[in-house]
Image (cartoon, helix red, strand yellow):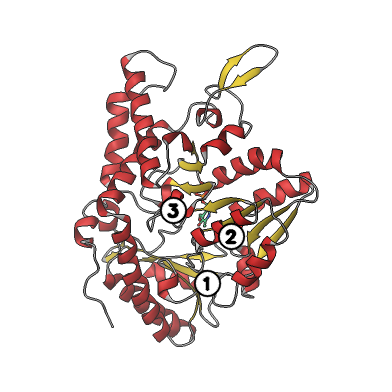
Amino acid sequence: MKPTTTVLDVARIRESFPILQREVSPGVPLVYLDSAATSQRPVQVMQAIDEFYRKHNANIHRGVHRLAEEATEAYEAARGRIADFIGAASPREIVFVRNTTEAINLVARTWGEVNLGAGDVVLLTEMEHHSNLVPWQMLAAKLGFRLEFVPVDEQGLLDMDAYKELLGHGPKLVGFTHMSNVTGTINPAAEMTAMAHAAGAVVLVDGAQSVPHMPVDVQQIDADFLAFSGHKMLGPTGVGALYGRQELLEAMPPFLGGGDMIKRVSLEGFSTNEVPYKFEAGTPAIAEAVGLGAAVDFLSEIGMAAVHAHEQVMIAYALERLEEVPGLRVFGPAPELKGAVASFTFPGAHPHDIAQILDSVGVAVRAGHHCAMPLHQKFNIPATTRASFYIYNRIDEVDRLIEGLYKVREYFG
Ligand code: PLP
């Protein structure tokens, strides 16, 4: 049944997103269903960046002049907001990075380099994005440890019995995505972390899709590391965060070498700065971090429980309507087990052609392997078309997607 409302005042939210007012061609308004790739940004984020450059721009941490102090304050305030947003015990546990990919590479190249070696096991899952797979493959090739994978069933859920069994192999690190960017599956992060800790493993959670869309509390999950990107949660590109438990961050060697990550340098060597600065070599994305702080404020004002509740209504309705389209196959579990992501195939139509036809009616979706080739291999398909929803999507936009899909059906018979 078509819902009439969700918990969010979507019309009001949309006022903050000027891009959603545009047409993709004359008379064809944009329906943006590609937020899993990158979200749109509200004017509040753009204004925060604009104001930073207009009034406060300077390099941080090293200056004593007024602008340098203000820029440092704005950058560190953003760190504090992000720490609160995910329930970190201290802002020191938040390392600014470029994105989820860099956050995971940081963990692999620092924690991994000193804690992993021949004979060790790192346990991942079959549903990982390449960014939580390739860094470990690269490191495994160098250090000689083994990668193992928790299987995914045909519904797109992890096989928890197999997980339990694989933990028996004594992995040093367990890494898993909190929410799949293909099936939308939400993995039971707290339960999985507790099981991994009981087996003696350190836990890294890929929060690229969960942090933007649902309440995520690192202390409730008890994660050791959590990686996420600003650009998927209304923030700018070029900035993201790695949460790391403070004692782990303190024990890790630095990642990149250069300015800001050091305490003292001589020609003979260097000593490292305290965390998190030890991991932030060079001038960071200052204005972008400030913009991410504004994005966190925007989301916090709405409330992450409300964001999730809205998306639950959207995905339940989207799945119901998608099921009506003859021949369409949707991947992933029931709506209550997933986020607002629907990936599907249509017999006889290539996912890219589907996306192109949808684009002709203004509906922006993504087609391809979504940087999760192994999961597509598991499902025996080369690619899917993916529609993903966020706080600014209206219920009637699901109908626009479905109308577009009937057009695809007409075209391909
Ligand atoms: N992990 C998941 C689950 C993702 O969906 C993505 C992006 O699509 C990433 C990691 C990588 O994010 P980024 O490209 O911002 O580093």
Q: Where is residue 161 in the image (x, y as percent from the top left)?
A: 63, 72
Q: Distance between the residues labelled 1 and 2?
A: 38 Å
Precedes in sequence: disc 1 or disc 3? 3
For disc 2, the neighbor class at 10 Å (few under 14, some 14 to 19, many from 20) is some
The location of residue 87, given as percent across then percent down, is 40, 46
Q: Residues within 10 Å of mark 3 (few under 14, many from 20)?
A: few
Q: In the rendered view, does 142 fall on the left or right side of 400?
A: right
Q: In the rendered structure, which amino acid carries the disc numbered 2?
A: Met
Cβ atoms under marks 3 and 2 closer than 8 Å: no
Quarter of the picture holding the N terminus:
bottom left
Q: Can residue 391 be seen in this view?
A: no
Q: Nearer the viewer, mark 1 or mark 3?
A: 3
Q: Is mark 3 on a helix, strand or loop?
A: helix
As measured in the structure, the alpha-carbon distance from the residue carrying label 1 to the one carrying label 3 is 38 Å
The answer to whether 150 is drawn above or below residue 344 in the figure is above
From the top left corner, tell me how far across and down residue 232 is, in percent: 42, 52
The disc, 3 or 2, on the residue closer to the chain's N-terminal end is: 2
* Residue at mark 3 to residue at mark 2: CA–CA distance: 14 Å
The amino acid on which the numbered mark 3 sits, given as a three-letter code, is: Gln
In the rendered image, which residue does mark 2 sit on? 195
The residue under the point 52% across, 41% down is 245
For disc 1, the marked residue is 351
Whether 270 is drawn above or below 409: the answer is above
Front in this rendered view, residue 219 or 209: 219
Q: Can residue 205 be seen in this view?
A: yes
Toward which corner of the image does residue 12 lie, by quadrant? bottom left
Which residue matches tag 3? 220
- Sequence-first tag of 1 and 2: 2
